[in-house]
Amino acid sequence: MSKASQELYEVAQQAVDLALKKGASAAAARAAKSRDVEVRWRDGKVEQIQESTTRGVSLALYVDGRYAAVSSSDLRKEALETFIGDSIVMTRSLAVDPHRTLPDPALYAGRQEIDLQLEDPAYLTVSAEKRRTLAKEMEDAARAVKGADAILSVSSGFNDNRTESVRIASNGFSGDSVGTTFFIGAEVAVKDADGRRPSDSSFAGVRFVGELPSAAEHGRIAAERALSRLGAKKTESKALTMVLDNRAAGRLVGALAGPLSGQALQQKRSFFEGKLGQPIGSKLLHLTDDPFVRKGFGSRLFDGEGLAARQRVVFEDGVLHTYFIDTYYGKKLGLAPTTGGMSNLSWRLGERSKEQLIKDAGEAIYVTGFIGGNSNATTGDYSLGVQGFMIRGGTVAEPVAEMNIAGNQLELWKQLVAVGNDPYPFSTLRTPTLVFDGVSFAGL
């Protein structure tokens, strides 16, 4: 298991010590260093190469009942001393906020000592040539598909990142994390007979570069998805079964997860207020927040304020079991802290594949993407533009576009009638194919 550099530990500890020396009653510091490289390839040549390395320290300062969050990229000792001194003077001018405190140290206890496999030791072996080669492979594959003469442009890219951070708090917390990510992706735009320019994409991400899927495969998929949009039209308005592609399902699930935060609850901007222990969806809505997924994009041993990570059931058989509550909003709401935010979602999966769910759907709409629209976190009302395909007789048929779905989240999740066996691997939400009955589609 990798450790963050000693330099970052020294910077974080120094920042906390200086804060206490200059009058803070408590402090927490996060020192971090990140390297990010991106190669963009467009229509046969490199469009952009960008590399950046950043270092910085952020502090939470607690001074005479007041609180401030500050940050600096100048890590020299003399610069930090001046910066922290000035920040404490500024903090004393703020209003008293009795709810701002460091977490109870008891919440730091029980931290798992396991290797989540978040850092690839081979990170520095990735060459500029490899980045360009993968980006080029995606375009070449996209332009080799059947019907490629309708392609207007292909954009592809490779991005990699390595971030290490250290957090130290004056009440006893100390911890670090190191992680790498590698992403490939391609977007293809095509020209329709009516002059429209539909586009679609495909991308993938991993923690270890050796586990990247075929770049050519994702270029091909992006092109085929875009070309499949040719001739898309509205269809008649009616209530139909919706088969929601696992890649697109994150849009709905994100709108479901957002109002679970302590901030949304305290500010009366959550349709989940007062609904703990109540049924929200069908019995198929069964989600766990799981920070211990090996190589997961949201995996962690502690959260942003140092609380030890734990698995938590969010929905069980449709019933809401927990909120995401940090120390500050826990005090304001009079609730015990859980964690400040979601890590990875683990679903109770079904047994059927996407193809089987489509076959069993009869007449339905297979939604592959959302375009615009919004979901109101306070009321749960949503209105979203969708694109996808008609399903007729259990077979994917003609493409549809410029359609809209509308309703309320608290009703929609009760209409969940099937969950696929195919969690989307390139997101913290890890959504499978979902099937909803009786969704209102607006078109012609």
Image: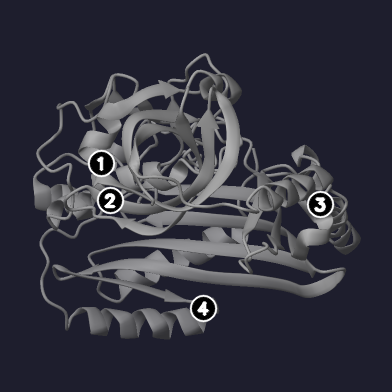
For label 3, count other residues whose C-alpha is less than 10 Å away and answer few (under 14), some (14-19) or many (20+): few
**Cβ atoms at labels 4 and 3 below 8 Å apart:** no
Snapshot quadrant of residue 206: top right
Say which of marks 3 and 2 sits in front.
3
* Residue 319 in view here: yes
Task: Specify the amino acid type for callout 2.
Answer: Tyr
Whether 157 is drawn above or below 298: the answer is below
* Residue 121 in view here: no
Say which of marks 2 and 4 sits in front.
2
Could you tell me how far apart the alpha carbons at marks 4 and 3 are, in whole angstroms? 61 Å
Q: Position of residue 151 (x, y in %)?
A: 77, 61
Task: Specify the amino acid type for callout 1.
Answer: Gln
Q: Earlier in the sequence, mark 3 or mark 2?
A: 3
Q: Which residue is mark 1?
A: 409
Q: Residue at x 21, y 30 (%)?
A: 280
Could you tell me how far apart the alpha carbons at marks 4 and 1 are, in whole angstroms? 51 Å
